[in-house]
Image (tube, coloured by chain):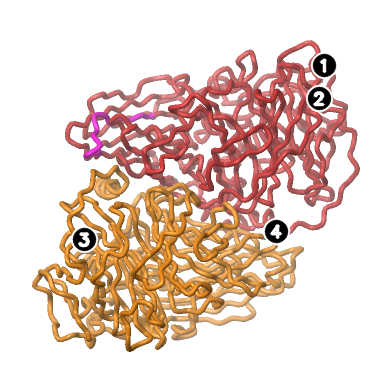
Chain colours: A orange, B red
Amino acid sequence: MLYFSVLSALLLLAAGSLAQPTPTFPPFTDPTVSYYAPGIPIETPLPGNYGNYLRPQVHYSPSRYFMNDPNGMHIAPDGTWHIYFQYNPTDPVAGNVHWGHAASQDGYTWTNQKIAIWPPNDYTSVFSGSAVIDVNNTSGFFPDQDNGVVAMYTLAEYPNGTAGNQYQAIAYSRDGGYTFEAYEGNPVINRYNTQFRDPYVHWYAPGGYWVMVLAHSVEFKVEFFTSPDLKEWTAQSNLTRYGVQAVQYECPNLIELPMEGQDEPVWVLQLSVNPGGPLGGSTAQYFPGAFNGTHFEPYDSLTRFTDFGKDSYAGQFFNGIPPGEEQIVMNWASNWQYTNLVPTGNEEYGQFRSAMSVPRCVSLANTTSPASEQTYNWISKPCAIDTVFDTVLASNDTLDNGTVLVDYRDLESGAIYLEVTISNLTLDNPAGSINFTASSSLTGEYLQGGSVVGGVIWLDRGHTYLFPNPLFTDKMSVNGFFGEQSNGTWSMSALIDNSVLEVFGPKYSPAGTASFFPEAPLDTLRIDVGSLAPGATASVQVWGLTATWLDQADENGTVIGNVTQSNGTNGTSPGGYRRSVKLY
Amino acid sequence: MLYFSVLSALLLLAAGSLAQPTPTFPPFTDPTVSYYAPGIPIETPLPGNYGNYLRPQVHYSPSRYFMNDPNGMHIAPDGTWHIYFQYNPTDPVAGNVHWGHAASQDGYTWTNQKIAIWPPNDYTSVFSGSAVIDVNNTSGFFPDQDNGVVAMYTLAEYPNGTAGNQYQAIAYSRDGGYTFEAYEGNPVINRYNTQFRDPYVHWYAPGGYWVMVLAHSVEFKVEFFTSPDLKEWTAQSNLTRYGVQAVQYECPNLIELPMEGQDEPVWVLQLSVNPGGPLGGSTAQYFPGAFNGTHFEPYDSLTRFTDFGKDSYAGQFFNGIPPGEEQIVMNWASNWQYTNLVPTGNEEYGQFRSAMSVPRCVSLANTTSPASEQTYNWISKPCAIDTVFDTVLASNDTLDNGTVLVDYRDLESGAIYLEVTISNLTLDNPAGSINFTASSSLTGEYLQGGSVVGGVIWLDRGHTYLFPNPLFTDKMSVNGFFGEQSNGTWSMSALIDNSVLEVFGPKYSPAGTASFFPEAPLDTLRIDVGSLAPGATASVQVWGLTATWLDQADENGTVIGNVTQSNGTNGTSPGGYRRSVKLY
């Protein structure tokens, strides 16, 4: 059995990396028309079952079928968080891509929305892109409002089923991001290029214009554009050949991040690559540098990763957060090596695939190690995670060397957050270790992680057994930072949410993300603190988290989502074409 | 039990990455004097047991105790291969470093030699470095010979047990690399720098001088030097901040590699980093670029890895091979995250730790993917592996979709080499997969690897159970290349040598190295070829390899090594100081 599943699994992976046949370029169809494949709800989200033990409860996952890259992330002027995502609404595998949509008031509790962006015809997918609030109506789409949303995305043609042209289009929403109309002037950028995608748009305040970056995926190149109005784009510069030599560049972000110890934020290019990440498959990197409004120049040639886990890809920063503040990113918590095969795609688990990370608040800091000090460490923490604290499962401020045991079998969400802090460490003798194990009382499976003061931070998903895939790497690790900036403390936290693990080391140290798939729910937590230096002390807190999805579900675990944005055309598409909804 | 071993294991890892206390600098002792710690044989190698089932039989491993980086690698004018290595001759953990030594006529069959280089006093270790043949007697050490050997290495002081000065010294050998005398003018480079090490020297023919590169380990910097005579060194340039942002740079190599499709070789800087490799711990990278005799400029800012496995570090290229030919490298097949803990250090396994890779013949090639074509793929194959072919265990030139089973329980070496080639593939439909599994009939443990045409190449050591360490990552993978340069073939080979696995994908694709530790010998091989494209064919060959170590061993598995280089002072050191052996 293993052989057959391994073979078929791996064969699925081969297709993407091979030479493409010469593409054909069909004529553009009416850009204001949408194609609705049969059987997909148009004016409501798909309902989905969130009641299974593998379903994350404080992470976003699609109601049903397949999700990949986060798209169009923004926080609206009214405070509503919007995430869109690459979405196949008909199958739990990648393909047939639309922009799915969900909204939230807190970044953790999400309401599924109807599909936001549809393809213009039946041979085109709506690939990744971003969205901005056009406060000043630079686009002219919003004569009467200051909260209009413009989405920019790639339309990827597959004439005759083979990869063809990838071009850039925009669509606008006058109802706060729920309903989009395609711009009649689409495409806004078209070069008849088959590997040219993922526009990320951001307002460049010093110049009073929009900047956009997108990927020439197989040329190790990102290109920078500017625009006064989101419609007319001027190519300004290219950045080539940075980061890991992988196969494809995807999902660039250009963002300003606050930097500890200085007033000015630092420009960062975030870039995902797949396949060819060092852990296999997908990975994401960042490059701090200088941006003058048209050209980006990295400060150095180092490759820095945004996460040490294997399941953190295509991260996108939210638009709508003022420069200078911590910026918020969400990553796709999966990996192209196996995402089409993970067990949650089975009917019994709700037939969904992939989750997003929780929102992470990101800033930069230089540390005193190495000697050169220009480290630009990526500091990321779950944003206001206490938003979803439901119950205190354990609290011990004087643990020192010792163990904490928690039985959380009765926790509705099955999701916990633990935090361990070692204090009163000295630079001369910074000793101590933290280990956690979440195990299943039913099967004995367990998920582990840990860290050593000043040393390694690690996680191990290899003792959960529902997904025996040869590419599903079990162990990931990174080195953490302990130095004079650490103020004598070393901490570690972990968010264990049914099938998603996020591990956060002490400040200045990377986070790690890994999906995991046990055969039965994890329900027992053990935390060990050991080998503390003399005088050091440890504290442990464990919280049970809110069941944000079950709280919306009926008794069968089914979540309906938002059906109030309907435009009077509820029901399932009979298939065919329709002009974009006119809201005005 | 697991908890205790995990805790103690991880605490060992913390020390290296912390802030160092202010070093003290003792005065230099007589540079021509060696310190001999008590109980170490001076004029003979340590005997060791090579009879255990975990002992590699075609890989170099030390007779006993601990080995890390390869040093002083060269092929002498008489054709003898010499490897030196970081060696603790008193304990199976890192420390107390000398240069161990072994010699070979074929790169696979090694004869252990007496320790080559000793420290000058009891608070200094002999860290990594290189060796050259001073054919033209530029050094003046060799008035009567053209095969003199000069070793250049780092002396690392540990006054009062804490890390102190690291400075560069040389020693010369007039007997073909067996016995070295320290240069009376040592140190040749000294800056009272505590992170300044691993000189790699190479003859720069266009300039008629020596070039040397070494690492400023914690500054993300390598420095280039030149010398007319190996004694006087002129600092020429620095290269900073390339590759993965890890913690320490180590073991740079500057070498010319032949490049497919062009006459001129390409300069490459190879650089190891630890900790902080993306898979955790140690990793190695390379940077193709231009070298003008004093300055090295990488062609781009990409990070490229020399191996996709977790156990390939500190590789060093052999001196003595003419430029323009394939160059030969050997890597240390372990990882600092766990090398001090692997089970072979136990008495029952011969109390040795770590092995080298087999010699790999390396060249570069640009592939047609990505579109930019400047890929500089690292092409590495085991050099003349047929040297150690002993028996044909299986041979099938018309396997196509199918399975080959091999029982190799009676193979003396326990070491096998398998090669699978798929031919007659087309660019339009390059389909097929290769899987291999080596399992133990006693325990059911197994080691796996495989590849998919045009897709992933993977290995999995996670089903061998003697070393349950949370940092001992089980699964590693990389993307292989299939394109028009592949001539319609896809191949995969694997060298499975008791506790070392080396996997080689098709040409243009990276190799992967992983140590592994089963509880019983692997003795059954299964190879599966499946899902071949119509018209494609497959062939499989499996060889049993020579037991190069057991062939030298007595009936107890003990290998004595070369005792004929004795200078009349056989026996074990009583401890204390002694002036370098004078051979003339």
Regarding mark 3 in the picture, which secondary structure is present there?
Answer: strand
Residue found at x 49% / y 34%: B53
Q: Can marks 2 and 4 be said to lie on one chain?
A: yes
Task: State yes or no: residue B420 in magenta.
Answer: yes
Magenta-drawn stretch contains B9: no
Tell us which disc is closer to us: 4 or 3.
3
Q: Secondary structure at mark 2?
A: strand
Q: Which residue is mark 4?
A: B18
In this figure, which residue is indicated by the disc labeled 2? B181
Front-most of residues A565 and A554? A565
Asked whether disc 2 touches disc 4, contact meaning CB atoms under 8 Å apart, the reply is no
Magenta span: B418-430
N-terminal of the pair, mark 1 or mark 2, is 2
Image quadrant assignment for residue B576: top right
> As drawn, which residue projects farthest toward the top?
B144
The chain holding disc 4 is B
Q: A263 left or right of A242?
A: right
In the shown orientation, is residue B9 left or right of residue A107? right
Q: Quadrant of residue B166?
A: top right
